[in-house]
Each structure stands twice: as structure tokens, then as C-alpha cells.
Image (cartoon, rainbow, N blue to C red):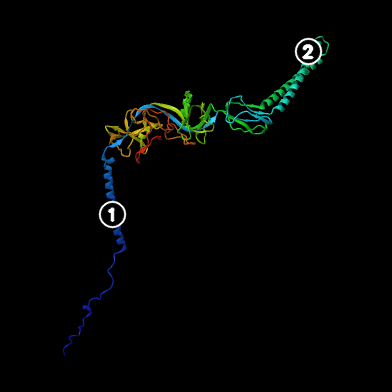
């Protein structure tokens, strides 16, 4: 019988396909993906760094200042003298200060001085009731007169005994006794004289006069006040105003040069300035140094004397002090504003043929914005501005309109400006300068120089006007 066509043929297992599976294709591991991102970011970072480095090299090779010459102002190095100063802080100290107290007990009857008055030595100040002491003095004088007469009578008797002894009318014992009686009376008279002198001194204490010439302070007692000799009440204070001194300290490292100058009988000038170190008050001279160094501060005290006829210095006033130790002659001087620093190296830009040449120098003493240097010669023209644009071998153009100032015109008169250091400042009080320390308050300057204002700076080119190299 024929087979049914709709009937499926049976296929053996060896001819069947494997059943389909629903499992997804295997994913890449997380570590591989992270590694790929790291590589990509690293490539981008390296590329960005290379681009920045290329730009920096291009900028460095390009000349600063837009590629053109740099406009600068100039100063000229000159030969001159400059002082070596010590900057310190000091206190105005009178030579004499007299605080008068009572030496007797009594009532104040008169006050002769006015507050703030300048009194001369011997001028009357205060009177104390002297009547009790005058009465005592009168009693002592009466006792003295009585005993003087007793002594005179004893001497007369002694003379008679001598005449009787010569005639052998009396024994020797009577003569000797009379001699001793005369000596006793003589001693009594001496005692009375001492009492009278003591009472005279007590009376003199009742009339108080000025022991020195100076200025009296505020009134401390009034008429009618009772004063005691054993008390501590001050009746009046007198302070000598002229001459007056200033006591200040100098470091022990600077003691040698100062002592050497004093041994050579040199007169060392001392200038005093106000608290801010700007206004000069008075000029005097160094008197002496203390006899020992203060081990806690490493300084030694010095005393300077001032005439102070105008009373500009006031007792216990705080001042800044500048001691002129020495003067350097024929030194090469330039304004401190022309000196630049790169770390510990100081340099200037010397202008030759409209080209700036960097030259290393060694700064020395600085005073009032003017610095003594070695490394340049008098007459060299130096750049004094536009340091943020200058570099070695830069082309320059000298400005036709320099900043206004007395020291900018070549060869014109100039004054030294204020320097950089001062002591209670500062000048401190603990602030003590050393030899060659920075310029302090202005002094008579070198012609042709002024301290111009500071210029913009760059990290490698620092304006150090008025600074002191260390």
C-alpha cells in the first residue's frame, strides 16, 4: 500500500542540529575597559603638555616688550662720599633730675615757682615755717655765749695760777687742775658751736632753693600743707633741659669700630629723629660707652650729648638714633632703585650703544637711598626703570621725559630721601642697626641723586630701593 505523503520521515539523532541557546555573547572584562580609558587619557595628557611646552618656548624666544626697544629712564654712577651709620633706638635722659623732699617738719608757707618754669640755680622754690627752728637756734646761740664767757674766765684764772706758780706761791697741783678746767670749758664751747651750726642748717632747710638750673614740673604742694622730714612726699621736681643726653644701644659686633674711633679722639656725630624716623630733631656727639655688655641682648649702652637750646628733646622721649661711625671717601655711588636682585646676586643694567648689559655688582653701605657699590665705574649710565621688560642685550630707548624729581636731571642738585630702616620703628625698640645698615632718615645727599619711587618688579628682578644687602 502506498505511504502517506504527509507523514514526516523520521531523522536520526546523528543528523539533527543542536537546539538554539538563549545565552548572550561573552562581555569584555571590566579591567580591559579601564585600561583602555587610561591609555586614552594618557595620550591626551601627553599631547596637551607638548602643546603648552611649545607655546612657552615660542614665548621665551620672542623678545619681551612687544619685540621693540624698551623705554627706560637712566641714572649715572658718580664718585662721592657716603657715611657708615649705626641705626638704633634711644631714650632722652637728662643729665640731672632733682626730686626735692622736705628735710624738716612744718607747714608750707610760700610756693615761689610756677608750673613749667625754667629756674636758675639758687632761685627760691618753697618756704616752710621756720619759727620753731629759729627759736631753737637762738637758744643754742645763748648757750654758746654763756660757755664762751665761762671759758674766758677759766683762761684768766689759769693765767693767774701761772704767775703764782712762777713765784712758788701755789702748789703745782692747783695749776694742773686749772689747766684741765680750761680745756673742759673749751670742749663745752665746741659742743655749743656744733649745736648752733645744726640749728642754722635746720633753719636753711625751711627755705628751699633750686639746686640746679632746669625746668620745674607740676606743682605738688600748696601753701598750708604739712610736710614731714621722715615722709616720702616730693615737693618739686627739677629736670635739666640743656644740655641733655640720649642713651641708646649698639650691637656688640659694632663695638670695635666705634671704640677705635673713640681711641683716635674722633668726634662721632649722632642724629636724633622722631618716632617715625622721618623728621630730624637734633644733632649731637657721642660722649662715651658703658663699661659692660648686656649679655641678655648682646648690646652695649652709649650716651650722646645735645645742646638742646630749643628744648626740642624732651626727657624720657623715645627717639630714633643714627650714629655716624665712619665716612667712605671717593666711593662709587648709585641710587638703590637701580639695583636688582636675583636670589643672592645683585646686578644692574649698564647702557651702552642703546643696549642694556646685565652686570653683577657688590652693594655696600646704603644711606638715604644711595648705595656704595663695586662692579661699575663712575660715569656709567644705568637703567632705572622698566625692569619687568629688560633682559641682557635688550635694545633700549632713553626716555625724553624722566619722572619729576630733583635728582633726575643729569648733574642737577639732588637730595637724599628717606632710607629703609629705623629702629622703635623702627627704629625699636629692639630694632638695632649694624654697620652698613639700610638708609635711615634723610641726610645731606650726593649732588645729582634722589630716591625715585620703586618700579614694578618681576620674581627674578626685584627692586630694592633703600634696602641693604646682607
Direction right: furthest residue: 169
Relative height, residue 89 to residue 121 (above, below): below
- Coordinates of residue 33 in the picture (x, y in percent): 30, 61
How packed is label 1: few (under 14 Cα within 10 Å), some, or many (20 or more)? few
- Coordinates of residue 356 in the picture (x, y in percent): 29, 34
Residue 46 or residue 90, whichever sits in front = 90
Going by the image, does 395 lie left or right of 363?
left
Residue 378 or residue 162, whichever sits in front = 378
- Coordinates of residue 3 in the picture (x, y in percent): 17, 87
> Where the N terminus falls, by quadrant?
bottom left
- Coordinates of residue 419 in the picture (x, y in percent): 42, 33
- Residue 126 in view in this figure: yes
The image quadrant of residue 66 is: top left
Direction top: furthest residue: 167
Residue 290 or residue 144, whichever sits in front = 144
User: SS class of the residue under badge 2?
Assistant: helix
Q: Residue at x 29, y 36 (%)?
A: 71
Q: Which residue is mark 2?
A: 159
Q: Which residue is mark 1?
A: 44
Relative height, residue 313 to residue 186 (above, below): below
Query: Is the C-beta separation of discs 2 and 1 under 8 Å?
Result: no
> Where the C terminus falls, by quadrant?
top left
Amino acid at each position: 500500500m502506498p505511504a502517506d505523503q504527509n507523514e514526516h520521515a523520521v531523522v536520526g539523532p546523528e543528523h539533527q542540529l543542536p537546539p538554539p541557546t538563549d545565552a548572550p555573547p561573552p562581555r569584555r572584562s571590566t579591567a580591559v575597559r579601564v585600561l583602555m580609558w587610561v591609555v586614552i587619557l594618557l595620550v591626551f595628557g601627553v599631547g596637551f603638555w607638548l602643546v603648552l611646552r611649545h607655546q612657552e618656548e615660542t614665548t621665551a624666544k620672542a623678545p619681551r616688550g612687544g619685540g621693540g626697544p624698551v623705554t627706560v629712564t637712566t641714572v649715572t654712577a658718580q664718585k662721592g662720599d657716603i657715611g657708615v651709620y649705626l641705626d638704633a633706638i634711644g631714650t632722652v635722659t637728662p643729665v640731672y633730675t632733682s626730686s626735692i623732699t622736705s628735710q624738716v617738719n612744718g607747714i608750707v608757707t610760700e610756693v615761689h615757682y610756677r608750673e613749667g618754669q625754667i629756674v636758675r640755680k639758687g632761685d627760691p622754690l618753697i618756704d616752710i615755717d621756720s619759727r620753731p627752728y629759729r627759736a631753737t637756734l637762738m637758744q643754742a646761740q645763748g648757750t654758746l655765749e654763756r660757755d664762751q664767757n665761762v671759758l674766758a674766765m677759766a683762761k684768766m684764772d689759769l693765767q693767774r695760777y701761772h704767775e703764782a706758780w712762777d713765784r712758788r706761791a701755789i702748789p703745782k697741783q692747783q695749776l694742773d687742775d686749772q689747766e684741765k678746767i680750761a680745756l673742759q670749758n673749751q670742749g663745752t664751747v665746741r659742743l655749743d658751736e656744733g649745736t648752733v651750726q645744726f640749728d642754722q642748717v635746720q633753719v636753711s632747710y625751711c627755705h628751699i632753693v633750686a639746686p640746679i638750673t632746669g625746668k620745674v614740673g607740676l606743682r605738688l604742694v600748696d601753701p598750708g600743707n604739712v610736710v614731714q622730714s621722715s615722709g616720702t612726699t616730693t615737693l618739686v621736681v627739677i629736670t635739666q633741659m640743656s644740655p641733655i643726653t640720649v642713651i641708646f644701644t649698639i650691637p656688640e659686633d659694632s663695638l670695635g669700630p666705634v671704640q677705635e674711633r673713640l681711641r683716635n679722639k674722633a668726634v662721632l656725630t649722632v642724629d636724633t629723629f622722631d618716632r617715625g624716623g622721618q623728621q630730624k630733631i637734633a644733632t649731637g656727639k657721642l660722649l662715651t660707652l658703658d663699661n659692660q655688655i648686656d649679655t641678655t641682648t648682646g648690646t652695649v649702652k652709649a650716651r650722646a650729648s645735645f645742646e638742646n637750646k630749643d628744648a626740642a628733646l624732651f626727657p624720657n622721649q623715645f627717639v630714633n638714633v643714627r650714629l655716624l661711625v665712619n665716612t667712605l671717601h671717593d666711593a662709587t655711588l648709585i641710587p638703590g632703585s637701580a639695583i636688582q636682585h636675583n636670589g643672592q646676586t645683585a646686578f644692574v643694567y649698564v647702557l651702552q650703544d642703546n643696549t642694556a648689559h646685565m652686570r653683577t655688582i657688590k652693594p655696600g653701605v646704603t644711606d638715604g637711598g644711595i648705595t656704595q657699590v663695586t662692579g661699575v665705574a663712575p660715569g656709567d649710565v644705568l637703567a632705572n626703570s622698566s625692569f619687568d621688560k629688560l633682559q641682557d642685550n635688550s635694545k633700549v630707548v632713553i626716555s625724553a621725559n624722566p619722572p619729576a624729581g630733583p635728582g633726575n636731571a643729569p648733574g642737577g642738585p639732588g637730595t637724599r630721601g628717606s632710607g629703609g630702616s629705623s629702629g622703635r620703628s623702627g627704629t625699636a625698640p629692639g630694632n638695632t642697626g649694624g654697620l652698613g645698615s639700610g638708609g635711615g632718615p634723610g641726610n645731606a645727599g650726593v649732588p645729582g641723586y634722589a630716591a625715585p619711587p620703586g618700579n614694578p618688579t618681576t620674581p627674578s628682578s626685584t627692586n630694592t630701593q633703600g634696602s641693604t644687602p646682607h
